[in-house]
Image (tube, grey):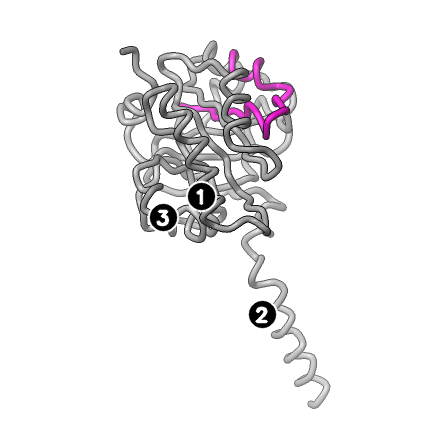
Amino acid sequence: MGAVLILSVYVWAFWAFFVSPTAFRWQALYGDRKYPDGYEIQGIDISHYQGEIEWNMVKNATINHCPIRFVLIKATEGASIVDENFRENFYQAREHGFIRGAYHFWSRRSPAESQARFFLQNVALDEGDLPPILDVEHKAKTQSVEDFQHEILTWLDIMEKTYGVKPIIYTYLNFKEKYLSDERFRDYPFWIAHYYVEEMKYTGEWKFWQHTDAGRLPGIEGEVDFNVYNGSFYDLQKLCLQDD
């Protein structure tokens, strides 16, 4: 009986401290097949990690029985890296009728202004494209929150002055709540990463929800991120850049 009791305590402790806190990630081993209900506007985000894409197959694919409406594409990183598949992906997305967006991956190693100028040098957004997107997931440990927020706002301000609209901010839920909930970020459209849950836990306003990093689609080898838009297709079109 003593051995059984010890084993039971060991199993409980292992589950409570090692398995349970990360159990949601185990779903990625099989792909997250239970997608959130109530959203008709589906999309994906891609980079060179998805390799060469069969765009005709993606165009005819569905997610949760809905057509794919938008594609968000990695463009640049820091002040010196252009995603090797960006130009091809960006061109093909529009050619195949998707609303497209281009995102910049924030680097802790380069000043905000240098990163913004680099993005603008390599990305030409047109009417019908989504506003510039900033993917921010990291803060330097030695940087104060105030300085970090100032840098992020500098990048966003340069984009807004260039295109005349608020850029979109991508981040994951905990990072948003910890570093990007200042009043100054309130009016920006948010794209939130929050995986393997049936509903978005963030209570603020958001536009896009990246709900899994383990999606599967014909035309793409391996896994791809799935997203939904929080609104109608008309709303999504209105979010895009307009001809003045």
* Residue density around tag 1, few if under 14, some if 14–19, many if 20 or more, within 10 Å: some
Q: Secondary structure at mark 1?
A: helix
Q: Is residue 86 inside the magenta stretch? A: yes
Residue occupying image coordinates x 42% and y 36%: 153
Q: In the rendered structure, which amino acid carries the disc numbered 2?
A: Ala
Residue 80 pos. (x, y %): 63, 24
Q: Does the stretch in magenta take in 55?
A: no
Local SS, label 2: helix
Residue that mark 1 sits on: 149
- Judging by the rendered image, the residue that carries numbered circle 2 is 16
The spot of residue 105 in percent (x, y) is: 55, 32
Q: Quadrant of residue 39?
A: top left
Sequence-earlier tag: 1 or 2: 2
How far apart, in angstroms, are the residues tagged by discs 3 and 1? 9 Å
Q: Residue at x 27, y 23 (%)?
A: 234
The residue to which callout 3 is attached is: 182
- Residue at x 49%, y 46% (from the top left corner): 195
For the residues labelled 1 and 2, the Cα–Cα distance comes to: 35 Å
Element carrying mark 3 = loop
Give whichever of discs 3 and 1 has the lower sequence position.
1
Mark 1: which amino acid? Gln
Up-down relation of residue 29 to residue 86 (above or below):
below
Give the residues in magenta: 69-91
Q: Quadrant of residue 14?
A: bottom right
Label 1 near label 3: C-beta < 8 Å? yes
Q: Is residue 173 visible?
A: no
